Image (cartoon, rainbow, N blue to C red):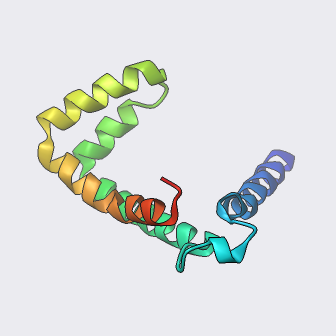
Amino acid sequence: MKTIVCTAMLGAAVFVAAPLAHANEDPAANPPNCSAADMEGVRAGVEASTSAYLFTHPDVNAFFNGLSGLPRNKLGPKLKDYFAAHPQTQAELTGIRQPLVDIKNRCGHG
């Protein structure tokens, strides 16, 4: 029980602190729609869409599950090979991620 409570508290602390890392202290320096809330809203939407995609594409989900625990230097080549063999999957995942890329670029976080 103690471990669950500590884990929940740590998760809550990270959840609360994460948006603050993106917030500029000077509101005048933030372009419109570039607040921490905007960034986190887009990120949440992209994460939800990615989750839905993986649940509806079990083969892609299985591939990504198979990457768990691999060292970083092995991930790049595996992803490159997979996407070369599955260009439609790459295009779909790129499209899902695009709103996050767009807001990061527009707001100067890219």
Residue at the (29%, 32%) spot, across then down: 79
Residue at the (51%, 65%) spot, across then down: 107
> Residue 67 location in percent, x, y?
39, 30
Q: Can residue 52 be seen in this view?
A: no
79 vs 107: above or below: above
The image quadrant of residue 25 is: bottom right
> Residue 49 location in percent, x, y?
36, 65
In this view, which residue lies farthest toward the right?
2
Q: Position of 38 compared to 3: left or right?
A: left
Q: Position of 109 compared to 93: left or right?
A: right
73 vs 30: above or below: above
Q: Position of 21 compared to 50: left or right?
A: right
Q: Which of 78 and 97 is in front in this view?
A: 97
In this view, which residue lies farthest toward the front?
28
The image quadrant of residue 64 is: top left
Residue at the (49%, 64%) spot, across then down: 43
Residue at the (32%, 53%) spot, across then down: 54
